[in-house]
Image: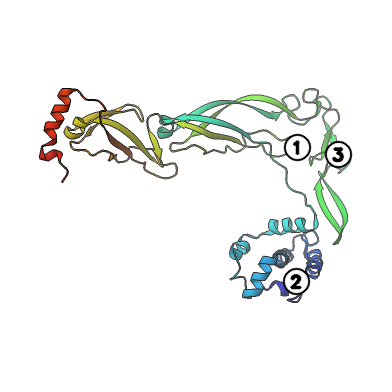
Amino acid sequence: MNSNPYEILGVSGNADQDTIKSAYRKLALKYHPDRNPGDHRAEEKFKEITKAYEILSDPRKRQAFDRTGSWDGMPNMSEFFTGFGMDDALRAFQDIFGFSRSRGPSPGADISFDVDLDLKDVVNGTDREIRIKRMEHCRICDGTGADPSEGLETCSNCGGQGRVRTIRRTLLGAMQSVEICPSCNGRGKVPKKVCPACKGSRLESRERKVVVDLPAGISTGHYIRLRGQGHFPEKDGPPGDLIPRIRKIDYGKFIREGDDLVYRTLISFPDAALGTEITIPAIEDESRKIKIPAGVQPGEKLILRKKGIRRLKGFGRGDLIVIADVYVPEQLSRKEKKTLEELSNSKHFISS
């Protein structure tokens, strides 16, 4: 493929913007897919000239090309060419000249809702049964919008084709396009008489129970997209999606750090010196006891491998990290003070 945008559009290196736009207009008219249906080579040419125009119509990109003489020295150009397809070319064409093309049927609206979880839900995963109200096909007319006793008839506007051809006079001349028939919304048929239940809208509100599977390892802000579980559209098209979003998670006395769980415990100085046993709140089903070794230092981390949260995408799980903080009393009895004064002279209580 030619990589020189000036040569692609057939203009000189000092061409002004009016000349560049005029050259693109002529070539776009010649190679536009609506004028060359099924012609793959014309489609490739249309993409090529649109890419060239995208560069030369942008002063920053044009200056970068003029400076280096190739795409290689231009910012993000490799990504631009790799991902540039026919849809991109047509969107650019529409942005430049204001043309439009018919698209497929639009889906129905999505339904979003918030979900609150606790620690066990995140560690084990959970199922939630929820009630939603969504728009579905009318049960009386089965979504046709027609009175069941009357039925449907062929659309007089499109002759039952569901599409209509329109010719527009534009800067590029006469452009022909095929669009969805506005009278029948592409179905080719219209009600002889509208349904008395839905008034021809084809839809009714219905309550549904939906079970949502929330995997272990999910975190605040995550959402799950359940395809086709949302509202049905007024026109023909697929339903929207159901999107549960994790609003907040109650971790209790734990702090989450990635897939690790951190539990801070406060122990006395004697327990820190002699060692002790503490009880950790339940993470899955039962609380657990762990030993604090003698001589543990303030803020020291005790790590229990693979006792944290299961990884959302992948195998394994994080760790449980216990941090021992030593409590220093603010008030002491005379006996306690005397005992500590005696101990302070011991070599074991003097930092080396």
Mark found first going from the N terminus, 2 or 1: 2
Q: What residue appears at the point 11 percent right and 32 percent down from the top-left corner?
A: 342
Count of marks placed on residues: 3
- The Cα atoms of the two marked residues, 3 and 1, are separated by 15 Å
Give neighbour class at mark 2: few <14, some 14-19, many 20+ (Cα, 10 Å): many
The answer to whether marks 3 and 1 mark residues whose Cβ atoms lie closer than 8 Å is: no
* Residue at image mark 2: 9
Q: Is residue 101 left or right of residue 324?
A: right
Of 56 and 9, the residue lying toward us:
56
Name the spot of residue 14 as percent of width and height, x first.
75, 76
- State the residue at coordinates (77%, 58%): 96
Residue under circle 1?
235
**Element under label 2?**
helix
**Which badge, 3 or 1, comes first in the chain's sequence?**
3
Label 2 and label 1: CA atoms lie apart by: 42 Å
Disc 3 residue type (three-letter)? Cys
Q: Residue at x 84, y 39 (%)?
A: 183
Instruction: Give the numbered dot on residue 128.
Output: none
Q: Which of marks 3 and 2 is nearer the N terminus?
A: 2
Nearest the camera: 208 or 69?
A: 69
Q: Name the residue under label 3.
A: 155
What residue sits 36% from the left and 30% below the top? 284
Residue 1: in sight, yes or no? no
Q: Do the residues labelled 2 and 1 touch (CB within 8 Å)?
A: no
For the residues marked 3 and 2, what is the alpha-carbon distance in whole angstroms? Answer: 45 Å
> Where does residue 66 sit, x and y in percent of width and height?
66, 74
Q: Say which amino acid is labelled 2.
A: Leu
